[in-house]
Image: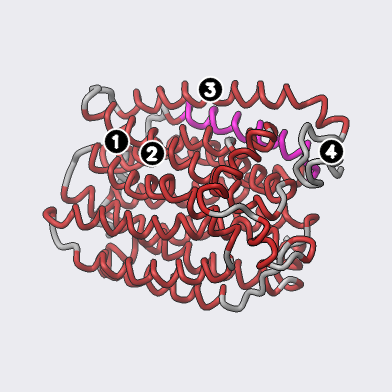
Amino acid sequence: MDEYLTLLRRNPNFRNLWLGSVVSQLGDWFNVIAAAAIISRVTDSGAALSFLFVSRFLPLFLLSPVAGVLADRFDRRRILILSDLLRGVTVLGFLLIRDAGDIPLFYLLTVIQFSLSALFTPARGAVVANIVPAGELVAANALDSLTWSTMLALGAFLGGVVAALFGAETAFVADALSFLLSAYFISRVVVGRAAGQPAARAAESAPAGRFAFLDGFRYLWREPFILGIALAKAGGSLVWGAINVLEIRYAYDLFPLPGAGRLGIADAGTATLGLIYVVAGVGTGVGPLLMRRWLGDAPRRLVAGVSLGYVAMTVGTAWLATVGGVGGLLLATVVRTLGTGTLWVFSSALLQTIVPDRYRGRVFSFEFAALTLTQSISTLAAGAMIDRGGLAVAGVMGVQAAVSLATTALWALFHLRHRAILRSGGLPLRAAAGPSAVPQLPE
């Protein structure tokens, strides 16, 4: 942990960006618990839960191409601050939700909130490489993952407590305040461009409008290795998207916390859901740290880590399809999230390491659009299989285990195809050095 603390002490720009993440993610998980509790209270429809998650994912897919162009042409720090401020105002609108008749407004506000998140996420992914030296990018991403997972665990617990004791409205107010505090920390970040390139010059060199978006696609088409890395999370989200819905069913319908009443907990389902999020936070936080200690930071090792992440995700998902109680549910969740956390961190670090700054925003927006599209497909399919397909929740989880096995096999083929070149220390692309040179991967 000393390495991560040193990174925060030595790099004030990353420290402020990280502090913004700490408070906003804590508020986000307050929001998730409150939203899930409201939907589960007013309806028992699997489709309603699916729509909740789709209203979060679909705007990210639709707006990510625009967000990537903006992140490559304009001041990324200002994009982050504006997105935080507007999200804080939007979240306060959730205070207007009173009963089942207000659910359409609930979905609309969620769409607005996550449309703004679509502007935030690619810009932040690109900013990390602007303020962190290349040799510390894996450490920075691992710290981000640990932060996300810690806030997941802490936020889920506190969000459940706050929602139970003070109501969902208090959780939404806390989320709104977290965005305002995040904007303050980000305002203290000084963002430069790679290799000392001024932001204005980078913007002038990029094509305008729709041509900038198409130029990003052409870049990915020319660089199949980067395209594969950018699609790694999309393969994972095809699995974990449905699990977001299924976890709520597991918590409220199959495994509400035994003895919750004796502990003074009125809502046993919410208690189980909170525990699921806590152990998921442990898995996503610990997984990348362990994998990094074992494999190291070399790009070829990061690719191997993504492969191991896929394997752990598949094992954990298959286990979830067979669990018979809360204990098994939590253990299987840890295994699954050990894999998904590693997959996420290592693929992000690879992109930040080898993608040129002028394309970085568009590559991250493509990655984000792809993963939100597959996540939306997965969540809708889960709701349909429960409501119209007549499948039990465990049966749907079994389908997801099969999907996970298929995506793991596809990634293994990609890894094997590039294995020889990765071993030799070269890349089958012209990612970092421009169109006339093939860079060497650092060991």
Q: Earlier in the sequence, mark 1 or mark 3?
A: 1
Residue drawn at 20 percent across, 39 percent down:
45
Front disc: 1 or 4: 4
Residue where numbered disc 2 is placed: 376
Element at label 1: helix
Give, as a three-letter code, the residue at label 3. Leu
Distance of label 3 from label 4 (alpha carbons): 34 Å
Quote the CA–CA distance across marks 1 and 3.
Answer: 25 Å
The boundaries of the magenta stretch are: 295-319
Mark 2 → mark 3, Cα distance in angstroms: 19 Å
The amino acid sitting under disc 2 is Ser
Amino acid bearing label 1? Leu
- Pointer 4: what residue? 438
Q: Is 305 a magenta residue?
A: yes
Q: Mark on residue 214?
A: none
The Cα–Cα distance between marks 2 and 1, rounded to whole angstroms, is 24 Å
| Tag 4 secondary structure | loop
Look at the numbered disc 3 and give the secondary structure of its residue. Answer: helix
